[in-house]
Image (cartoon, helix red, strand yellow):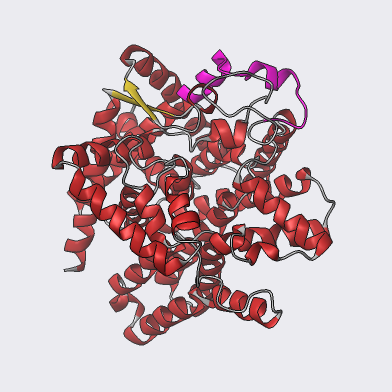
Amino acid sequence: MVRGIQKSMYVILALFIGLFIGSSFFIRAKYSYFVYGDTPVLEKQQLGLFILVIAVVLALSVALYKIGLKLNKFSRKVVIPVVLLCSFTVQLAIIFLFPRLPTDDSQTVLSLALDMLYRGDYSSFETSGYLHMFPFNFSTVLYLKMLLLAFPDNYLTLKIFNILFTLVTTLMIYLLYKQLNYKSKEQDYGILVFAATYIPSLFMSNFIYNDVIATAFLTSALYFSVKFIKRRSLKDIIFAAILLAIGNYFRSIGVIFLITILLSLLFSIRTIGVKKGITALFITAIVFNVPGWTQNAVLQAANVVDEPVNANSAPVNMWLNMGINLETFGFWDNRESYSIYQQDANYNKAVSTELFKEGISNKLSGASLGDLVKMYYKKIIWTWTEGTYQVERYGLGNDGSSGSSGRMVGAVMDSYSYTNAATDLFKGDSNYRSGLLWLLYALNFLMYGGILVRLVGGIRTGRFEENPIILVVLGFIGFYLLWEIKSRYIYPVYPMLIVLSYMGFKDVYEYMVRRYFTR
């Protein structure tokens, strides 16, 4: 029965990946803040250019893979630190070359952290305050406050810590791969090199928010849970539970990883042992909510709030309401949902919940079946094939002095601390900027190709070791089919895509070598 369920998961994900690959030959998903503003775009694919860029990226991928093969003769104690140091150097150069200023929520949480640090101002928890509406962002505010208290008060401090978290994610990608692909006799440094040079992660160190931090903790949690299933040491599941709880504290999509870990434990209950398996399930489930409970207890004890912070926060229905939009297929609805909570419900969670339920019902009943199918198709295709995690805006940034009718111009929305030759090259909608977006788009497509190869191979041979990763990816697909979308929101799943795609790429490479280059 378990193997049947696992095979079904492989088949379902293969169908989604096939949909992404097939659609990409006809539709190009785009996000360019400078050109279009904060809007998702779907346009006709430029097939010739698409194939050309794929060929270039494929050649670069083969070159990186061969570098990994050449590194196999060296010890982990040498290769891992050197690769991570090189990645650190590249990311450090990026944050100096593109000194992106905080924007939107990242600017807000940083301002709140400074207010709490220097003025002891917690008024944002009061009605109409930012943390009253979005208390889940207090974790980021608290983190920034602690860093600014302990280290020099500047952007460089925060971005360097982002780099360190990215390096942790890179290492965990490699270790997770080795746990899942334990039969490999090679060191497989290729995946370490791939993760260390993955362009979206290099640039997202520039983004002062919770994405990079949560990704590191959640990926680490998954690694330790897989390690526990393999070795059955309770200290591993304790580490996994703690890391998962912290990761979820920063981004609530940790619940997808929680479900993944719990299901993985249940699938392996015979291997682990019933007693130890139940203990692991109990530890994971209990520890998961500890950060939230602790936060509420501390804030109420300090008289910052007089009720749980979620009592009147924006309800989940608000994001579900945003997720149903025929015009922008679930993208930002230009504050329409915010207004329902803030103005119509006067920041009352219960009242706004009913209003959102009514709104969702009206949207569903007012649209035809064809309209809804078309909307959800556009929604899932744009989210998963855009391929850049919106790094063009959040990581690369743009000079606020550049004019465009499509975006909001100004120092707050889009600017650098200073400009230089690099920012000038990537200014506006330059060829360098659009070229980078094409590169990332094609890389994402090739990764899906590798994933599909691995999935089909697993289905044919009955090999389902990667089911924890499969569950995470399926969880994200299902969740963001309903939720408000941004391609940045699926950033925490990039480690899973790297692991699966590298496995598939390696399968193809080794097959080609055996078939055509054995002599």
Q: Is residue 346 left or right of residue 480?
A: right
Q: Quadrant of the C terminus?
A: top left
Q: Which residues are magenta?
A: 415-438
Q: Measured along the vertical axis of the image, is residue 338 above or below residue 468?
A: above
Q: Residue at x 38, y 13 (%)?
A: 49
Task: Name the foreground residue: 129 vs 113.
Answer: 129
- Is residue 57 positioned above or below 462 on the image? above
Q: Position of residue 340 (x, y in %)?
A: 43, 54
Instruction: Name the residue furthest bottom.
Output: 275
Kindly identify the residue that appears in the image at 63 percent across and 52 percent down: 165
Pinpoint residue 492: horizontal percent, then vertical percent.
Answer: 48, 50
- Where residue 238 sits in the image (x, y, percent)? 52, 76
Residue 120 shown left or right of residue 14 in the figure: right
Task: State left or right for residue 115 relative to residue 362.
Answer: right
The residue nearer to you, when weighing 432 against 444, is 432
- Residue 250, quarter of picture: bottom right
Q: How many marks?
A: 0
Residue 435 is one of the magenta-drawn residues: yes
Residue 441 visible to the viewer: yes
Up/down of 34 relative to 183, above or below: above
- Does 407 lie within the magenta span? no
